[in-house]
Image (tube, rainbow, N blue to C red):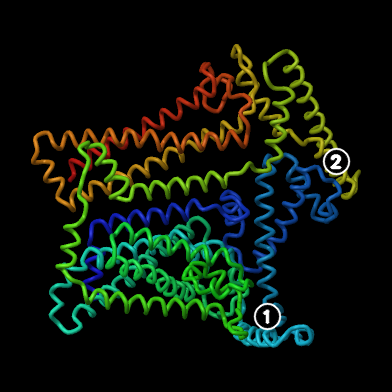
Amino acid sequence: MIFNEILKVISRRNFIIAFLIMLAAIVAYTSLLPIEDSSQKAYNEFRADIFGLSAEEIGERLDERVLELTIYDALLWGEPDSPAFSEVRAAKYIEKYKNNDKSSVEIYDLLKLYKREYSCYLASKNYKEHIDAITKGNDAMLTILGGDYERKNAALTKAAYEPMITAAPQYYPSEGCERTIRNFAVDISALTAAVLAALLLFGSEKNSGATLTLSLKNGNAKFALAKTGAVISVSFLVLLTGTAAAALTNEIRLGLGNPLRLLCSLARYYNTTLNISVLWFVILSLLMKTAAVSVFGMLTALLSLLTEKQITVLFTFAAAAASAVIYYKIDSVSALAFLKFSSPAALSAPDELFGNYVNIGVFGEPINAVFVTLLVCAVLLMIMTAVTALIYRKCSVATQQRKSKTKDRRVSDKLWVNELYRTFISCKGLAIAALFIAGYAVRLGSIERPFDIDDMMYADYIRYHGGAITETTESYIKTEQARFDGVRSDMYALSVAFSQGKLTGTDYNTRYAALSQRLMGERSFARFLAQYEEVKDIPGSVLIYDTGYRKIYRANLTALFVPIVLMLFLTVPVYGADRASGFDLYSKALKHGNKHLLYCRIRCGFVMSVVFTALFSLTMVSRYLLLYGADDILSGANNLIFVSLPDFKLPIILCLGIMVLVDIFIVSCIEAVVNILLKHRW
């Protein structure tokens, strides 16, 4: 029976479409999620640097690179007193980087990344001492200062870490594995799949399939249990498939390493008490997440038997959100810690739950947090399964029919009003749009202006020597270029003197660092000079600070992509509902019915395209203008050398408006084409 119920779900067109969308979302989320304290470019360089090296060789390479990047960073900032210059190896790196053109942001990203990974490497080398400090620590002071709870907690902690005494972690960058194990896109997709499966099996079939089993003893109850098993199985399948997709994406982007290495090899699981491999922990976390997701799936099943689908979905996702808020907002040492770890959402963060051994006080006794979470999750699942089976067993066809007759089926006499109602209310378009807007707002809020010394100095060049191009501008550029050329000449002479043995290594390092300080701003000046060379022959041109406009130009693709995807989410379900209800066949039977309906939907789609595209594009533009300023927004667009339009004399603000209009046109055309294709397809 369970297998048949699973087939019912996975063979439904709506579920297949939803599953493919969720799979694409998982890949997109995993691909675009920023790397902690680093950039993708820095991580790619790091991976290439350690490729093919053994663990010991990686350690040596990390140590060397930390020194190298520390010296480079000190040179960029003009810090001749940095302790790194006293190293014997400093001279070769000073010579190496004297003509390098990496920005301060790139070096800072690399330095943070290498320092973090080197720290993880050293931690794995010193793992035995770390575990010995826990299992053989002296509790004399704790016995004096602490109470009975603290003594019991210390004893349980030591016992919990005893299996780790023999563990020998193997270092390898753990970012890829950690992001695969804890992936919110996978968790949300599994939650959505559980809710959808419960709606299809319980809400949509609470009478149709159950009537045949009403005459059998416990027939309906067994049928309900089979559906419950199907909901759990579908949740596990989506989790498994989503995790596999995330793993493949992370392997390409970050690298996973050996899946058979111990779990404590991962940075976030350094303090775990599980002496198992990464692969076994992935399987374990999948089973536990399945239980957590199934709790909300069974909540959906229970509510779908008692109320309307819209209320069921709303209440279920509200319960899931409340569970997440409870877990992530309550501190582990709070008096409400028991409530925190009773939340099923705790299983969505396995690194926090299993990465450290945590006991919480229950009636004065230390109880492991993992035990509390799993016990509460299992109890909730069993209770809701039992209640759902009991209610499903008493389903009445006559009662449901009477309820359906009492529904208010009034509709508007305006076709476009009904279409908007179907899009935003019947097909949950309002909730979908709200989620897109909330997600985009979070994305815009996360955008910050990086601390880039090169860009800051470029802004200073524009502030003091930008604006209208005059003879003074040309004279200043020649003077500044001569200054930099002089410093380069002095550095070359210093290198020659050092190679001839006229200077000691210490003297060379000190004097070279001082000269490097005088080179600060050379890359910024090169950018200033490039803009000057591009626009100097164009009448009426000025030198402007264009970093913010560059960011807008590059980010416009994302601002265009989001409304396109949103319009697909709003449009496709309406046609699916037409097919399910038979409305598409009815409209074809009317004279010009299909044409009028298509015209109305294209018109509604155009209005929605204008609203949402303008919202996403204008908020993006406003965010970057807020970060980088809009002092030159009224100057001509011909001053923006990165768009290759030297004769375009319209103000920048008007060009930004044209860009938004072009985005609206593109989204509207795509929306119209989608409507036409779907209408002819159905």
Which disc is residue 153 wearing?
none
- Quarter of the rendering containing residue 544: top right
Type of amino acid at the residue the image marks with label 2? Ala
Marks 2 and 1, the one that precedes in the sequence: 1
- Could you classify mark 2 by the number of other residues whose Cα lies within 10 Å: few (under 14), some (14-19), or many (20 or more)? some
- Residue drawn at (69%, 22%) of the image: 466
Q: CA distance from mark 2 to mark 1?
A: 46 Å
Badge 2 marks a residue whose secondary structure is helix
Q: Which residue is mark 2?
A: 514
- Residue drawn at (76%, 17%) of the image: 475
Type of amino acid at the residue the image marks with label 1? Ile
Badge 1 marks a residue whose secondary structure is helix
The answer to whether 96 is drawn above or below residue 638 in the figure is: below
The mark total stands at 2
Given residues 495 and 544, the one toward you in this image is 544
Q: Residue furthest front?
A: 406
The answer to whether 113 is drawn above or below residue 340 in the figure is: above
Give the label, 2 or 1, closer to the camera: 1
- Could you classify mark 1 by the number of other residues whose Cα lies within 10 Å: few (under 14), some (14-19), or many (20 or more)? many
Q: Decide if residue 561 is in sight here.
A: yes
Q: Which residue is mark 1?
A: 131
Q: Position of residue 154 (x, y in %)?
A: 68, 84
Q: Is residue 602 left or right of residue 162?
A: left
Given residues 427 and 114, the one toward you in this image is 427
Q: Position of residue 658 (x, y in %)?
A: 45, 25
The answer to whether 250 is drawn above or below residue 632 in the figure is: below
Q: Position of residue 273 (x, y in %)?
A: 59, 80
- Residue drawn at (61%, 71%) of the image: 332
